[in-house]
């Protein structure tokens, strides 16, 4: 909990010293129509005793339930050693290492993180993280636009309709103010993926880049080789949005098609970061060496000192804190260093085989659950093709009703796709990771069947009442 030590007398003395009448004078350059009025609906703050009691009451409302939601945030097993090490004082309280000579341990860890991520993505270089996966995509789009030759005719980006909708919304919020236009490429309703034919319809736009998610939001595996080659044949950059755990099983972005993707980014949460009610997470970004000077964030380099001893230092750190303002490659300050520390420890402990086994177990559990739920009447997997650890289940009733009913049985059933795709109101996005046992999967199947029976009976009673009325 932050402690602000300034008294009213302290504040008055500081204002008097700088010649200001009140704190509002410090912001008089902001036009009045842009200033937010006092928020009347926000209650008065609580003291330490009151807030402690409130949080204790809220904690009692929290209970463990089987989580099958996914949709961009994934429940994986995190070895106890990960956060035990990350919580050591030298990591937990360390901030951005501006004074490199005093921060060699932190710098070395970030250097190792970059090496691991570049290897995982099959790319030449990685930065030392970004805010989160969605804003990392926005940064990748800005980076692609900066990398275009001045003669390029368009600031248009083709975005796969199978991309996570929150990523698309975040990217739009960040990049459209800079004159960049995002064009959604519809996905095929049979496979839940985008096709070359759908891309051909946008060929005349002479777009700057194509954004592909692998696996996509529906858990489907995109034909990334064909899509990448089409993009490069039409002079588009390829921006890959990748699940880092899935990258241990599938072809890495650097090997997509003949030339590989140009930029790879995504959410690092699966690498040892708990769900934590939505954050904090971290974003990652990798690219090819030819584009490195346009990469946002900081990069750690390895060098030698005058005595030929190895050392680590910040390099290519063209960010806002170096007073570059509009020339900065990024104006998003946070690089989520503590989360990256945990991810580095996580990858170190599991190693290549451990990460791959985690991915395989997730895939196998997903196939097992598909078999179980597909045996339920009037239920079927919606999209054809291959899955990783998520799939879309079509239900005879609205997914929101099933989610509510299964919650009563202690199961978080999945993500209601009707929230973001109105035509898919009866579709449920389900995620299964290595954390689930055979018993968990059987319990899910029984709970789903019970929920459907309850809802069917309830709907039947309503229909009967309507007829008799």
Image (tube, rainbow, N blue to C red):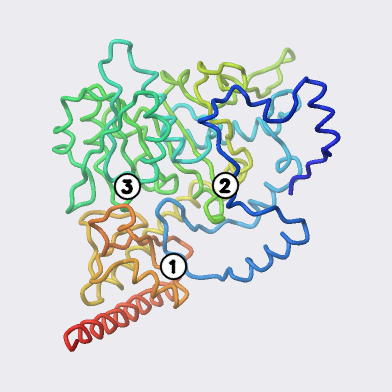
The quarter holding residue 195 reads: top left
Kindly identify which numbered label has been placed on residue 280: 2
| Residue for point 62% across, 18% down | 322
Could you tell me if the residues under marks 1 and 2 are in contact, i.e. CB atoms within 8 Å? no
Q: Nearer the viewer, residue 99 or 180?
A: 180
Real-space Cα distance between discs 1 and 2? 21 Å
Secondary structure state at the residue bearing disc 1: strand
Circle 1 residues within 10 Å: few <14, some 14–19, many ≥20: many
Question: Looking at the picture, does residue 108 appear above or below residue 422?
Answer: above
Residue 271 position, x and y percent, is: 52, 48
Could you tell me if the residues under marks 2 and 3 are in contact, i.e. CB atoms within 8 Å? no
The quarter holding residue 467 reads: bottom left
Secondary structure state at the residue bearing disc 2: loop
Residue topped by disc 3: 216
Real-space Cα distance between discs 3 and 1? 21 Å
Residue 407 position, x and y percent, is: 44, 73
Residue topped by disc 1: 412
| Residue for point 36% across, 36% down | 240
Number of dots carrying numbers: 3
Secondary structure state at the residue bearing disc 3: loop
User: Looking at the image, is mark 3 or mark 1 earlier in the sequence?
Assistant: 3
**Nearer the camera: disc 2 or disc 3:** 2
| Residue for point 38% across, 63% down | 414
Q: Nearer the viewer, residue 260 or 319?
A: 319
């Amino acid at each position: 909990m932050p402690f602000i030590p300034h008294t009213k007398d302290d504040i008055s003395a500081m204002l008097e010293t700088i010649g200001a009448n009140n704190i509002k004078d410090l912001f008089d350059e902001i036009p009045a129509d842009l200033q937010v009025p006092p928020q009347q609906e926000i209650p008065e703050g609580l003291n330490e005793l009151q807030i402690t009691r409130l949080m204790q009451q809220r904690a009692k409302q929290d209970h463990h339930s089987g989580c099958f939601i996914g949709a961009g945030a994934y429940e994986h097993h995190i070895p106890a050693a990960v956060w035990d090490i990350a919580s050591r004082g030298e990591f937990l309280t360390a901030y951005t290492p501006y004074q490199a000579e005093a921060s060699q341990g932190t710098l070395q860890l970030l250097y190792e993180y970059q090496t691991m991520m570049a290897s995982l993505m099959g790319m030449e270089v990685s930065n030392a993280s970004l805010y989160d996966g969605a804003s990392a995509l926005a940064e990748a789009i800005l980076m692609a636009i900066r990398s275009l030759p001045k003669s390029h005719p368009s600031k248009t980006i083709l975005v796969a309709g199978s991309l996570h909708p929150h990523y698309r919304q975040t990217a739009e919020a960040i990049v459209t103010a800079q004159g960049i236009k995002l064009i959604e490429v519809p996905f095929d309703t049979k496979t839940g993926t985008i096709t070359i034919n759908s891309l051909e319809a946008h060929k005349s736009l002479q777009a700057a880049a194509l954004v592909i998610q692998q696996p996509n939001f529906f858990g489907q595996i995109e034909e990334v080789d064909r899509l990448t080659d089409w993009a490069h044949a039409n002079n588009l950059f390829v921006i890959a949005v990748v699940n880092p755990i899935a990258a241990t099983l599938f072809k890495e972005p650097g090997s997509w098609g003949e030339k590989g993707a140009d930029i790879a980014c995504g959410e690092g949460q699966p690498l040892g970061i708990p769900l934590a009610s939505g954050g904090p997470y971290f974003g990652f970004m990798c690219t090819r060496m030819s584009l490195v000077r346009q990469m946002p964030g900081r990069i750690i380099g390895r060098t030698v000192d005058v005595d030929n001893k190895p050392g680590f230092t910040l390099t290519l750190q063209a960010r806002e804190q170096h007073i570059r303002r509009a020339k900065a490659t990024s104006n998003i300050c946070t690089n989520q260093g503590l989360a990256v520390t945990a991810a580095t420890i996580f990858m170190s402990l599991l190693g290549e085989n451990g990460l791959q086994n985690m991915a395989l177990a997730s895939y196998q559990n997903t196939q097992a659950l598909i078999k179980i739920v597909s045996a339920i009447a009037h239920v079927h997997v919606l999209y054809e093709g291959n899955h990783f650890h998520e799939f879309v289940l079509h239900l005879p009733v609205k997914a929101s009703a099933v989610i509510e009913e299964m919650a009563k049985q202690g199961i978080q059933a999945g993500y209601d796709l009707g929230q973001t795709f109105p035509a898919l109101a009866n579709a449920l996005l389900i995620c299964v990771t290595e954390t689930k046992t055979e018993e968990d999967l059987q319990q899910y199947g029984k709970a789903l069947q019970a929920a459907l029976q309850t809802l069917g009976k309830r709907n039947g009673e309503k229909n009967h009442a309507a007829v008799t009325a």
